Image (cartoon, rainbow, N blue to C red):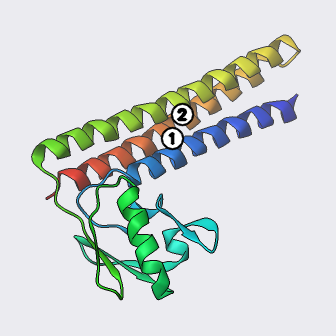
């Protein structure tokens, strides 16, 4: 019985960690006006017949807070990278000088910042719903074990551990949201 309880707790923790990872990926795509190489993580470019992330065919860096510079490893990749960025619907206007690609990340308007804060908070709520869903599934499985002969004390201790995980991961989510909102609202 103890192994089953531990397995339930491990699965619950794994799902909660996945929610945090997913939230982190979603928050990266919300532009705060500050340039970051991770903004291009979703951009795929064709390279010798395969679709690969831009980061696998070039160096990407941020020379300043408002600029992303992309230096392809092969000069023939400049046009395909530029086209992939334009087609990615990220709202970037790449500037190609034949050697490298430069992207100026414009500062968002006040209304756009407010919309981004709403989006950030929505993504945080989605992550918290995932935590609650993981808690519910874990508690349901613990109740089944209780019917199969698990002692009430072990079941109660396991439920307390699950709730502790929810509290810890909720604090992580709140911290991530606070940091992203400060980043968005800081001009």
- Residue 115 vertical position relative to residue 44 in the rendered view, above or below: above
Please state the horizontal and vertical placement of residue 185, each as a whole percent of the image. 18, 51
Q: CA distance from mark 1 to mark 2?
A: 5 Å
Binning the other alpha carbons within 10 Å of mark 1 as few (below 14), some (14 to 19) or many (20 upward) gives many
How many numbered marks are there? 2
- Residue 181 vertical position relative to residue 67 in the rendered view, above or below: above
Please state the horizontal and vertical placement of residue 154, each as a whole percent of the image. 76, 25
Report the side of 109 relative to 66 (left or right). Answer: left
Viewport quadrant of the C terminus: bottom left
In the rendering, which numbered label is found on residue 169? 1
Please state the horizontal and vertical placement of residue 49, each as a whole percent of the image. 64, 69
Please state the horizontal and vertical placement of residue 130, each as a whole percent of the image. 54, 31
Front in this rendered view, residue 149 or 132: 132
At 13% from the left and 42% from the top, the residue drawn is 111
In the rendering, which numbered label is found on residue 166? 2
Binning the other alpha carbons within 10 Å of mark 2 as few (below 14), some (14 to 19) or many (20 upward) gives many
Front in this rendered view, residue 182 or 58: 58
Q: Callout 2: helix, strand or loop?
A: helix
- In which quarter of the view is residue 125 placed? top left
- In which quarter of the view is residue 1 placed? top right
At 23% from the left and 52% from the top, the residue drawn is 184
Residue 59 visible in the displayed image: no
Q: Callout 1: helix, strand or loop?
A: helix
At 49% from the left and 27% from the top, the residue drawn is 129
- In which quarter of the view is residue 8 placed? top right
Circles 1, 2 touching at the beta carbon (< 8 Å): yes
Residue 76 visible in the displayed image: yes
């Amino acid at each position: 019985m103890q192994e089953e309880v531990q397995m339930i707790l491990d699965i619950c923790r794994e799902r909660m960690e996945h929610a945090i990872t997913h939230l982190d990926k979603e928050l990266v795509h919300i532009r705060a006006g500050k340039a970051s190489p991770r903004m291009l993580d979703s951009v795929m470019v064709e390279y010798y017949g395969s679709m690969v992330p831009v980061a696998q065919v070039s160096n990407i860096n941020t020379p300043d807070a408002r600029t992303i510079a992309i230096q392809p490893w092969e000069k023939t990749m400049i046009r395909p990278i530029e086209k992939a960025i334009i087609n990615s619907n990220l709202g970037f206007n790449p500037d190609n000088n034949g050697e490298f690609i430069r992207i100026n990340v414009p500062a968002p308007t006040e209304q756009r910042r407010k919309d981004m804060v709403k989006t950030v908070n929505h993504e945080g709520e989605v992550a918290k719903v995932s935590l609650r869903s993981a808690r519910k599934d874990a508690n349901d499985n613990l109740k089944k074990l209780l019917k199969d002969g698990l002692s009430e004390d072990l079941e109660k201790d396991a439920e307390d551990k699950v709730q502790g995980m929810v509290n810890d991961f909720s604090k992580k989510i709140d911290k991530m949201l606070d940091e992203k909102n400060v980043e968005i609202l800081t001009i």
